[in-house]
Image (spheres, rainbow, N blue to C red):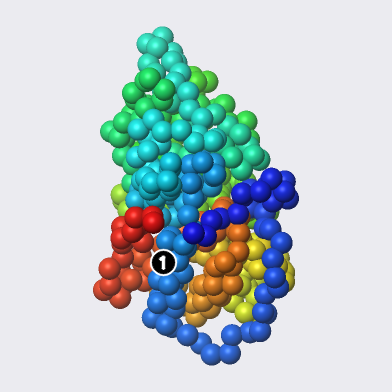
Amino acid sequence: MRSLGWLSAAWLAASLSSCGPAGSPTVDKTPVQAEITPEDVLPQVEEVLEFTLHERHLSIEQHAAWQILHGVLAFGAEFQVEHNGAPVAVVDYLLDGGTAKGWELEVVAEGQTGQRGVRTLMDPGSQTGQGHADQWLAYLSEAGVGLDRTIRVGSDLLTIQDWVRQIQLDVPRNVTREYSWTLVALTSLLPTDATWTAADDATWSIARLVEIEAGQELSTSACGGTHRLVGLTRALTRHRAHGGEVTGSWAMAADVIARAIEDARRYQNADGSFSTRYFESAGSSPDVAQNLGSTGHIVEFLALALDDQQLRAAWVTRAVQHLCELFRMTRDMPVECGALYHAAHGLVAYRQRLGASAGEASTAPAATADALP
């Protein structure tokens, strides 16, 4: 059985950032000579997702919540890991009270009513526990967890609603003002016009969080700003889907997203890869893992942000084809989990949207996951 990296202390010590690459062979930078269509690429996407899901196995004993929940982001609620030699659906395992290194939750009581909430303890930079505010619930919400889902924290039984309420109370306590994952979680579980009173006794809203995120500098943000863009994209898409007007902070978000799309296209390399400097300037690297990280994160953003016509553009197809090649090149290598599973999440979204537009099934690969051997 192949296993992801992170099994040796030396390799762990060598990883310096949440999206940092490991050493790897060089990438063939020969430009793509012939244009291909999305229909040409979809079978490659299917192949890549199949072996990533079924050949790269994680376990509770050897891997931490940081790695495991990135797998959930890509493959959803049916994503399985090994525990005591047997496969478990890890979303149910964790929410039903299972333990994993870095899965650290606490029950808190706030306000005069003493109403209980769920808070995730932070462990930024560890690549073990939650590195960004509300990261865990964002990934669980992407896997379809609803407000009424129960969650066991020690001997206490609460719900996702209790977790959401605590997130709302805690937004002013987020000293980094990084609300990328908060937006993903809240807009998945609440109306985008939601407002509430937070722990500072001020009125907060999803629109206010959007305004804060849209005003941040992408180049100094995690993974080139792709996480901020995904948060804004998820929020804006859901806002539009519910008939929300694109004015004020929502218009700011739309402008940021549009500029990033154009910058991704403008700085794309001749071989289809995206710039290793993300949206800041042109950039390339011979390191295959670094390319997997930058191209994978940008494909993830584009697969969520582009309209149907844009998604079929030749420059996007070339990028997806190149990303599939990077997956094949690293098939037998240890790969940093953040880069790997964000890239896989992008391919899942691409397959769902292009498969649906072509009249094909668009279920995530986890829907047909085989049991681990």
Most foreground residue, 81 or 196:
81
> What amino acid is at disc 1?
Glu
In the shown orientation, is residue 19 left or right of residue 148? right
Tell me: 206 left or right of 243.
right
Q: In this view of the protein, which residue sits in the foreground, 153 or 221?
A: 153
Residue carrying label 1: 50
With 340 as the anchor, is 358 left or right in this view?
A: left
Q: Which residue sits at x=31%, y=57%?
A: 367
Using residue 24 as the reference point, say whether residue 303 is left or right of it: left
Q: Taking the image as drawn, is residue 106 in sight? A: yes
Q: Secondary structure at mark 1?
A: helix
Where residue 88 appears, as percent x and y from the top left, is 37, 45
Q: Is residue 196 above or below residue 370?
A: above
Quarter occupied by residue 122: top right
Residue 164 rendering spot, x and y as whole percentages: 40, 31
Query: Does the rendering let one see residue 282?
Result: no
Rendered location of residue 58, percent (x, y): 49, 50
The outermost residue toward the top is 112
Q: Residue at x 49, y 36 (%)?
A: 100
Q: Is residue 51 above or below residue 339?
A: below
Point 67% across, 54% down: residue:
20
In the image, farthest residue toward the bottom: 34
When asked about the image quadrant of residue 333, the answer is: bottom right
What is the total number of numbered labels drawn onto the structure image? 1
Mark 1 is surrounded, within 10 Å at the Cα level, by few (under 14), some (14 to 19) or many (20 or more) other residues, namely some
Look at the image and tell me in which quarter the C terminus lies: bottom left
Q: Residue visible at 59% across and 40% down?
A: 128
Please tell me whether residue 198 is drawn above or below residue 243 in the rendered image: above
Q: Position of residue 209 (x, y in %)?
A: 50, 39
